[in-house]
Amino acid sequence: MRVHYLQHVHFEGPAAIEQWARKAGHLVTGSHLYQGDRLPDVDDFDLLVMMGGPMSVNDEREFPWLVEEKELIRRTMVLNRPILGVCLGAQLIASATGERVYRGPQKEIGWFPVRRVTTKGVGAVLPATFTPLHWHRETFDLPEGATRLAETEVIPNEGFQLGRAVALQFHIEATPESVEALVENASHEIDPDIPFQQEPHAILLDTPKASTAVRPVLWRVLNHLLGF
């Protein structure tokens, strides 16, 4: 199995997704778009993964590779190949299908509970509630025909599935190392006086236990996507 990830900034890599893939014996390759790497051809992978990033999917003039990335997503969906989008990656799937991506009612940054809203599709392997890492300001409208997967207290669309494409706003791939990188490079985005934004030290304090607890959820989502 060939797993290819698209990385948008140096501090948001595949983290536990790569751990899962290598443990399963899959071939892992990646395109670091912020470094000018070329996108893969649709025949170069069996599973496409898009990671997060601080930019918006609407910033196509500043980051022209977003246009090509959305086209790759559309071509992959037409072929019914599995796709996982995390945070910005989730928003890219929504945008690639023609849906609106826009500022949500407020930021979510930190370890906060998510509620499953369906047992259809990938929803069948999600716990009723679980606590992943959040780090996003924007949200999206659901694509036509998509199954809404999860919600939080402030964001109704935390994830969806459309065919074999799964979009998750939260960082289900978080590891202690990946969270440290996020805090180091993006903690300036946090306003701890506003609800649903944890202080950096609180995020790091919660990370070892919280990332371990959510790891089986990631494993089940990925195995479900691949039909295992």
Image (cartoon, rainbow, N blue to C red):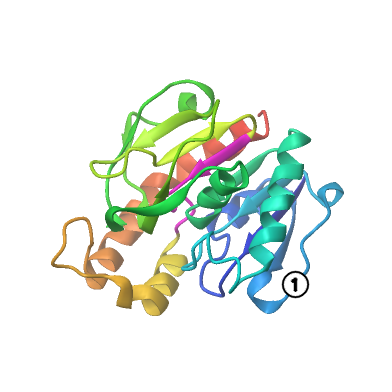
* Vertical comparison of 204 with 156: above or below: below
Specify the principal SS of the magenta part: loop
Residue 7 image position (x, y, % from top left)? 62, 65
Q: Residue at x 50, y 65 (%)?
A: 53
Q: Residue at x 54, y 24 (%)?
A: 121
Is 172 displayed left or right of 166 in the figure? left
Q: Residue at x 38, y 35 (%)?
A: 150
Asked which secondary structure carries label 1, the reply is: loop
Is 9 displayed left or right of 5 in the figure? left
Q: Quadrant of residue 129?
A: top left
Please state the total of marks drawn on the protein image.
1
Query: Neighbour class for label 1 at 10 Å: few (<14), some, many (≥20)?
Result: few
Task: Report which residue position mark 1 lands on.
Answer: 37
Residue 164 image position (x, y, % from top left)? 64, 33
Q: Nearer the viewer, residue 69 or 99?
A: 99
Q: Amino acid at mark 1?
A: Asp
Residue 153 image position (x, y, % from top left)? 23, 41
* Vertical comparison of 83 with 178: above or below: above
Q: Nearer the viewer, residue 105 or 136?
A: 105
Is 205 displayed left or right of 141 in the figure? left
Q: Does the magenta portion include 106? A: no
User: Which residues, given as a range, are shown in magenta?
Assistant: 165-174
Q: Nearer the viewer, residue 61 or 108?
A: 61
Q: Nearer the viewer, residue 18 or 23?
A: 18
Tell which residue pokes out farthest to the left in this image. Answer: 193
Q: Residue at x 69, y 47 (%)?
A: 73
Q: Does the magenta portion include 168? A: yes
> Is residue 81 in view?
no
* Vertical comparison of 140 with 115: above or below: below
Residue 224 image position (x, y, % from top left)? 60, 31
